[in-house]
Amino acid sequence: MNVLVIGRGGREHSIIMKLAQSEEISSLYVAPGNPGMGDFVTYIPIEEMEIAKLVDFAKQQQIDLTIVGPEAPLMTGIVNEFQAAGLRIFAPRKEAALIEGSKSFAKEVMKKYQIPTAEYETFTDPSTAKKYVEAKGVPIVIKADGLAAGKGVVIAETIDVAFQVIDDMLVSNSFREAGAQIVIEEFLEGSEFSLMAFVNGENVFPLIPAKDHKRVYDDDLGPNTGGMGAYAPVFEIPKEIITISTREILEKTATALVKEGRSFTGILYAGLMLTDQGPKVIEFNARFGDPETQVVLPLLKNDLLQVVLDVLDGKNPNLVWEKKTCLGVVLASEGYPSNYIKGTKIPSFKKSSETFIAYAGIEKTDAGFVSNGGRVLLVGAKGTSLAEAGRYVYSILPHNHRLEGLFYRTDIGKIGSVR
């Protein structure tokens, strides 16, 4: 088969590494990709949002299956356009992808179908939003309604910070259209984890859970990011909680979207918090999570291509998992998640047989790979335990925990991520 992956980040690199193991793929393409993805993939210089060009390429090259990594083209309707051209694609249509594209829409669906989540209200007027915060107290969570590259969520510990965030989003327009409407919700305490599933309509096939460390600094300090590292599975989450989360959250959400005329096909991602009242939804994504994908897919024994084809055909893919742990640490550019440095030379890592690298924000120059994004790469490893996987990863990173122009957290997998 001829297969096309759309995207350029670490998530897409992980998807490509897994697809490359399939004997059923004759040609594997990525658009646009990044230069760290290897020689076994053909790079296509078409941007993720150049949907008409991507459709034309897929038709010309007789692409049998396209897999979409990032969220932005989903919200623009790339799946609708591919399907209108008679092309097979694995991802949700624009109407279903709204579960990620609008936090207020996701909250409305959860409220209507009794899917457990934090209490909330939606605002466009800053003064009304501030009165709500005063009434509810802090800490409190403020979210830009639309897509904000993983950075549109602020946990306000004081009233002053909450008011400043409200002004930044609704008055100063710091997140542009994404922050023209905000969602303010109660602060949930507990153990946070991510649960993704292959979905086709009401058919839901969960992956193993992962834990993402979103705060930028050690000990879960600093602002939220797109993710500074992750591990899977999450042994501290009981199996019965995963069963409940699948039944009461993932399956109920898939059924709700069918009932709303927005049937979902693709990867449904639920960011969850295990509270004293049970698991509750923090957020939904309409695609593979990043960096969770980088630590989940390496543990999948199945041929990923066959899994996707089975899901599209309405079959049970019968997912099988390695009895190991996978851990990944993100190297980010100095200054991330705010204004970060670009052009840092990427060092060579002495990889072992247990470790791998998923590249993300890089470009190739005469001097080699240099950074051109916030999150630059992820160093990952599989081990017989979480501690062993962590030792493998950190053993190939500098002992001073810093590189020129790059930084990383030193405690991925060592502490529970408490929101």
Image: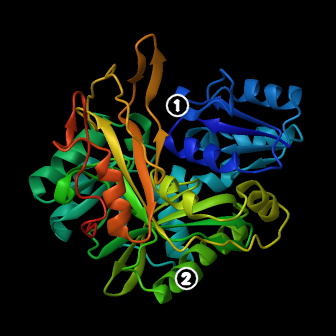
User: Could you say which quadrant of the image residue 109 lies in?
Assistant: bottom right
Q: Secondary structure at mark 2?
A: helix
Q: Secondary structure at mark 1?
A: helix
Q: Is residue 183 visible?
A: no
Label 2 neighbour load within 10 Å: few <14, some 14-19, many 20+:
some
Q: Is residue 203 among what the camera can see? A: yes
Q: Look at the image and name its color scheme.
A: rainbow
At which x and y percent is residue 152? 35, 47
Circle 1 crowding by C-alpha within 10 Å: few under 14, some 14–19, many from 20: many
Residue visible at 33% across and 40% down? 331
Relative to 136, residue 164 above or below: above
Of the residues under marks 1 and 2, which one precedes in the sequence?
1
To which residue does mark 2 refer?
Answer: 248
How many marks do you count on the picture?
A: 2
Q: Nearer the viewer, mark 1 or mark 2?
A: 1
Task: Classify residue 71 by image quadrant.
Answer: top right
- Three-letter code, disc 1: Gly
Residue 411 percent coordinates (x, y): 23, 58
Q: Which mark is residue 36?
A: 1
Looking at the image, residue 105 sits to the left or right of residue 328; the answer is right
Q: Is residue 217 left or right of residue 375?
A: left
* Residue at horizontal 69 percent and vertical 41 percent from the top: 77
Q: Nearer the viewer, residue 289 or 320?
A: 320
Name the image quarter holding the C terminus. Answer: bottom left
Residue at point 40%, 13% (across, down)? 367
